Amino acid sequence: MSGEDATARPHAPRLIVVEDDLALQDALVGYLRLCGFDVVTESTAVAFYDRVVREMFDVAVIDMGLPDLDGTRLADYLHTRTTIPVVMITADTSREARQRCLDAGADLWLAKPFDPEELVVALRRLASRSHPPEQDETAWQVDSRTRRLTAPDGTVITVTAAECVLLERFAAAGGGIVSRETLIGTHDGHADPTAHNALEAHIRRLRRKLAPLAAGRDLILTAYGTGYSFAAPLVRR
């Protein structure tokens, strides 16, 4: 099931809900949308990985008992490679399950059945971390929905879908180095040579687009043997 057919409210916090119980998924997503969230859904870990390497989210809600992979693996992926907060939900109420969720980097653990109002309060709190009240006017801004990058002076350039994903990853890193694997979108640390070559081609093209607006600076820095970083404040909007 997918939430792509829903009409998102302006500036609504964007959530991904990963839950294989379709009855619970429908009830939960319906309630969250009524509460003002922009929600998309997936039912498997494979679909989740495919989605998060292409799109950005403010918070992830993940079921621990997915059919193809333990949900804590997904939480660990987000915790180690992104800044997306995670809420884990599970029917396993044991202390061990709670500890596993927290060890994986989850920001909150909720046992089923949980109070949906408690979930909404937590989601709003966690989503606010992705949208600070004041924005740095000197920052570059990337808009994933329009695929536009706005320079601090207001100049707007259009980027491709692949370039937009790279910029979103740089924004999430907050100026830190983003590994080549993360930029390529692998979750197991492995990628074939063609993927690395494609990444380098995207980086070259993006550098050419940025050059006229960067006052002679290279905004995308190479950390040899590791990855790349963006050498200026960069935020999502």
Image: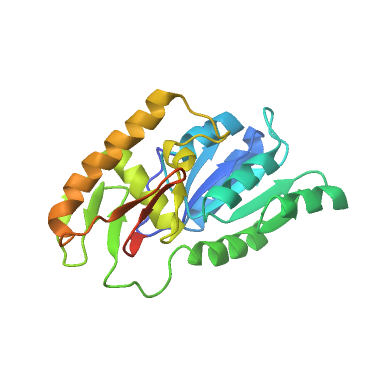
Applied colour scheme: rainbow
* Residue found 16% across the figure and 59% down from its top: 216
Q: Is residue 144 left or right of residue 61?
A: left
Q: Is residue 67 left or right of residue 182?
A: right
Residue 134 appearing in the image: yes
* Residue found 67% across the figure and 27% down from its top: 68
Where does the image place residue 98, in percent across and percent down from the top left? 79, 52
Q: Is residue 22 left or right of residue 167?
A: right
Where does the image place residue 30, in percent across and percent down from the top left? 54, 46
Q: Nearer the viewer, residue 218 or 123?
A: 218
Q: Where on the picture, by quarter, is residue 150?
A: bottom left
Quadrant housing the C terminus: bottom left
* Residue found 27% across the figure and 62% down from its top: 140
Position of residue 182 relative to residue 110, above or below, is: above
Where does the image place residue 202, in percent across and percent down from the top left? 28, 37
Q: Nearer the viewer, residue 41 or 164?
A: 164
Where does the image place residue 158, in percent across and percent down from the top left? 19, 46
Q: Where on the picture, by quarter, is residue 66?
A: top right
Position of residue 52 relative to residue 139, above or below, is: above
Residue 93 appearing in the image: no
Q: Is residue 134 left or right of residue 26?
A: left
Position of residue 41 relative to residue 118, above or below, is: above
In the orientation shown, which residue stands out farthest toward the bottom? 134
Position of residue 228 relative to residue 68, above or below, is: below
